[in-house]
């Protein structure tokens, strides 16, 4: 198998393991421990906070000590942390474990993307999109399996042994990802020997500084952050709107979100190939427009099929943005800074994802759906001229 195939296989298992311990198991487990709505929201979102703090340092560290070492550190968290869920008996312990489990994606995610960028050559858009789609498949399979295990054989809600069973399966999958990574991720990279700690620390700081000082990289990453803000708000409030306002069933609400994810997963590789061939800027702009229009339209739609159409358009727009933005960031960097660049990209991505539900909740609470959704869509439209002014049309010269 090639390096890319190995990365996809390991990424699938890791994402499958992570999804098992996340939705719908995590909020139900927090409820089982006696948490209220606000506390459940914190339990779900705390791992994203981990990514905000650690993705950029993890990516920069991989530029200094090597990709394989850093990825294996992340895979150790994927493999070992699910076992700690088996010991949880309080909400505070759950928060601690969730925060630490977030280190798995914070460390592994940006470094794996940097490796894909390393080996992709001129096919960065396509290969980064394939890698992302494989991870999405793992997430799609993990979530329903976790719900099925909780629903098996009991009435009146899941009990303690069922949660432990799900976490045990998550641990086995995480260990499988770690073992496969140890055996297959033999990445060819040159790591200088005899370099002191102070020199490595200086290079670590320089990598972060050079990436964050490039307006093109920060702006391009922010496009995905803004798009992800809308996605986070839609993820949180589409089910509520569909059930409480549009009168749909919970199953129909789940189908809406699932269809959006499937469209994104299927379209990303094709859109990535198109961005490699025809350029990335126009696809990012088109994606922001599609996401903004469909997001703004949601609170004015009431039937299942109109809402489904809006979700499909949003999913296509997400595919356009996400298939091109990470590849464009990689285009702007020398290979020695791919880790730092993907770390910065992931940090801004997580900030957007964390802000979406929070901002959406405040606006919906104050103004209602029909005012708050168009207001948030305006942020996507306002980002377009900033992006066009900051990122040149021609292929950027790397740092």
Image (cartoon, helix red, strand yellow):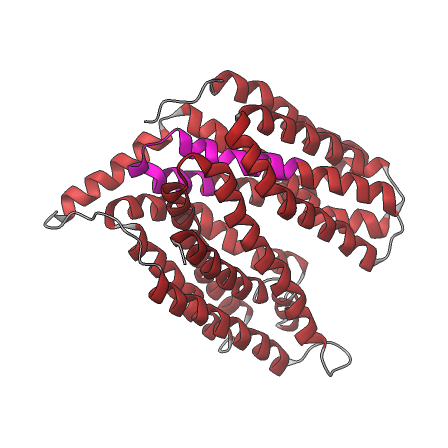
Measuring from the top left, give residue 296's x and y in whole percent: 76, 32
Q: Residue furthest left?
A: 194
Is residue 268 on the magenta stretch?
no
Q: Is residue 224 visible?
A: no
Q: Position of residue 374 (x, y in %)?
A: 74, 30
Q: Is residue 94 above or below residue 257?
A: below
Residue 254 placement (x, y as % from top left): 76, 56
The correct choice, above or below, for 340 with respect to 5 in the image is above
Q: How many marks?
A: 0
Q: Residue at x 52, y 67 (%)?
A: 94
* Lateral position of residue 31 relative to residue 110, left or right: right
The part of the chain drawn in magenta is 317-346
Viewport quadrant of the N terminus: bottom left
Quadrant in the rendering for residue 207: top left
Q: Residue at x 72, y 75 (%)?
A: 151
| Residue at position x 45%, y 70% in the image | 176
Location of the C terminus by quadrant is: top left
Q: Is residue 231 above or below residue 97?
A: above
Seen from the viewer's position, the closer of residues 193 and 352 is 193
Expressed as whole percent of the image width and height from the top left, the position of residue 195 reads 12, 47
> Is 281 situated left or right of 147 in this image?
left
Q: Main secondary structure of the magenta part?
A: helix
């Amino acid at each position: 198998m090639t390096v890319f195939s190995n990365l996809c296989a390991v990424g699938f298992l890791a994402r499958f393991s992570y999804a098992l311990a996340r939705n719908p198991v995590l909020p139900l487990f927090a409820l089982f421990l006696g948490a209220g709505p606000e506390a459940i929201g914190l339990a779900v979102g705390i791992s994203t906070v981990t990514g905000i703090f650690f993705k950029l340092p993890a990516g920069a560290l991989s530029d200094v000590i090597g990709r394989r070492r850093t990825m294996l550190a992340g895979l150790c968290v994927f493999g070992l942390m699910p076992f700690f869920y088996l010991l949880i008996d309080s909400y505070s312990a759950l928060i601690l474990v969730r925060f630490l489990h977030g280190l798995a994606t914070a460390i592994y995610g940006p470094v794996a993307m940097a490796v894909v960028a390393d080996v992709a050559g001129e096919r960065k858009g396509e290969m980064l999109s394939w890698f992302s789609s494989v991870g999405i498949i793992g997430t799609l399979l993990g979530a329903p399996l976790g719900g099925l295990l909780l629903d098996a054989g009991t009435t009146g809600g899941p009990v303690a042994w069922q949660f432990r069973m799900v976490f045990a399966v998550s641990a086995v999958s995480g260990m499988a990802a770690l073992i496969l990574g140890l055996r297959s991720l033999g990445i060819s990279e040159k790591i200088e020997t005899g370099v002191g700690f102070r020199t490595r620390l200086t290079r670590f700081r320089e990598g972060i500084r050079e990436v964050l000082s490039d307006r093109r990289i920060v702006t391009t990453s922010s496009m995905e952050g803004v798009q992800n803000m809308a996605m986070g708000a839609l993820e949180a409030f589409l089910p509520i709107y569909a059930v409480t306002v549009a009168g749909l069933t919970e199953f129909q609400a789940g189908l809406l979100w699932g269809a959006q994810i499937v469209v994104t997963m299927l379209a990303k590789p094709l859109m990535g190939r198109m961005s490699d061939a025809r350029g990335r800027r126009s696809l990012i702009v088109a994606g922001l427009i599609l996401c903004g229009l469909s997001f703004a339209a949601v609170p004015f739609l009431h039937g299942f099929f109109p809402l489904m159409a809006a979700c499909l358009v949003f999913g296509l727009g997400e595919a356009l943005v996400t298939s091109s933005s990470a590849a464009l960031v990689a285009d702007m960097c020398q290979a020695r800074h791919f880790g730092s660049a993907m770390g910065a990209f992931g940090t801004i991505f997580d900030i957007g994802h964390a802000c979406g539900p929070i901002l959406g909740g405040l606006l919906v609470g104050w103004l209602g759906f029909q005012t708050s959704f168009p207001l948030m869509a305006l942020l996507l439209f306002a980002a377009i001229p900033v992006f066009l002014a900051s990122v040149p049309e021609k292929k950027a010269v790397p740092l």
